[in-house]
Structure formats: C-alpha cells, structure tokens
Amino acid sequence: MKLYNSMGPNPHVVRMYIKELGVDIPTVEVDLMHAENRKSDFLKINAMGQLPALELDNGSVLSEITVICEYLDSISSAKTLIGDTPEEQAETRMWVRRIDLNICEPMANGFRFGEGLGLFKDRIITIPDASEGLKEIAQSNLKWLDGQLEGKEYIVGSRFTLADVLLFCFLTFGATVGQPVAGELKNITAWLGRIGSRPSASA
C-alpha cells in the first residue's frame, strides 16, 4: 500500500489512525500549496483531486478519510477503533457522522471561504459571505458536544474510536486558523488534553 499525503486535517486523520493501528504504510508527499493535487498526474490517482488517497497493493485507490480508516481497521489484526460488535460499530459510525457533518464540514468550509479563500477560490466554488455563519454553526455544535461529553472519557464512552481521531485532528487544525475551542467548553478542553497526550497525536 501507499498513502498520498499532504498538509491539512484530512491527511492528519489518516496518519493518526495508522499510528494508532500500529501499521507501517509508505507515504508520497503531494504539494497542496502548489496545487499538485489538481494536476493531471494526481487526478489519475484520485479524480476528485483531494488528499489523502490510499493506493492498495492491487493498484486500486481509496479516498475519503472515513473510508480509508475503516478499510485499514477491517484488515488490521491488532485492534479496532470502530468496534467489535455490530452495536459498537453502529455507535461509532453514528458519532463519526455527527461530528463530520455538524462540526468538521462547517469548520473546514468556514476556513476555505474565509482565511483560506486565497488558496481555494480558484480550486472550488467558494461562498465568502457564508464563512462566519459556518464557523458559528461549528461552534454551536461544539457547545452541544461539550454537554454530551460530561462524565465520558471519550466521545463513545470508554472506547477510543475513529470519532475521537476525526474531531481531534479538525479541532487542532481549527485552532491554527482562527477557530479555537471556546474556553468555557471544559469537557472538550479536557478531552483535547487527553487525546493530545497520545503518541499518535503528532503523526
């Protein structure tokens, strides 16, 4: 296998997941700042022009971070960050979807349409007027999640899962682009400290 990697929260999710699983996958760096991912050579690998992408041994390519992580989880003999039972797997996927749709997506687009506009305006459709509203949506849903974390070690109770990896990578990214976690969100702040102390956090 081979991982096409770059800067940004999406590749960070996959790198952190790989480190948690304890597997070793060679990486190929793609220069996002110079739009290497939008050039013909990379578009042959991933027609969406997005990173990361995982090339399998048979030459096929997987993209979309949750798909890549679930695939790696399914072939790992060491551990699972999805769940051992159908119930655990469903609970993990429920929280992953909630976090992805309600926090990660508005946070990322708030950046792309705001601080990142210069980089993205010629690559995707951008809506600059929506930037602040999207950031507010992300923060509002973070406040809701703070309440849900009361008394929990991880997002899915006592289990460290893909949901934790996904949220951690996007919140650490958000903190660097003007979207820090509000100080009054004590549960999320404490959770960030716990996840940030894991060796995989720096992947």
Image (tube, rainbow, N blue to C red):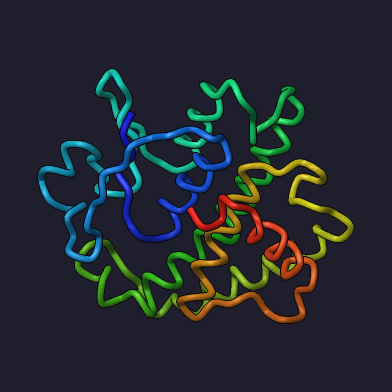
Judge whether 129 appears above or below 32 on screen. Answer: below
In the rendered view of the protein, which quadrant contains the N terminus?
top left
Judge whether 82 appears above or below 65 on screen. Answer: above
Q: Residue at x 53, y 32 (%)?
A: 70
Picture quarter containing residue 146?
A: bottom right
Picture quarter containing residue 151?
A: bottom right
Residue 144 x %, y %: 75, 65
Q: Residue at x 51, y 21 (%)?
A: 75
Picture quarter containing residue 195?
A: bottom right
Residue 53 x %, y %: 33, 40
Q: Residue furthest right?
A: 151
Q: Residue at x 17, y 55 (%)?
A: 36
Judge whether 124 appears above or below 186 on screen. Answer: above
Judge whether 108 appears above or below 51 on screen. Answer: below
Side of 45 relative to 112 (left or right): left
Side of 82 relative to 32 (left or right): right
Of residues 68 and 120, which is closer to you in this image? Answer: 68
Residue 114 x %, y %: 39, 78
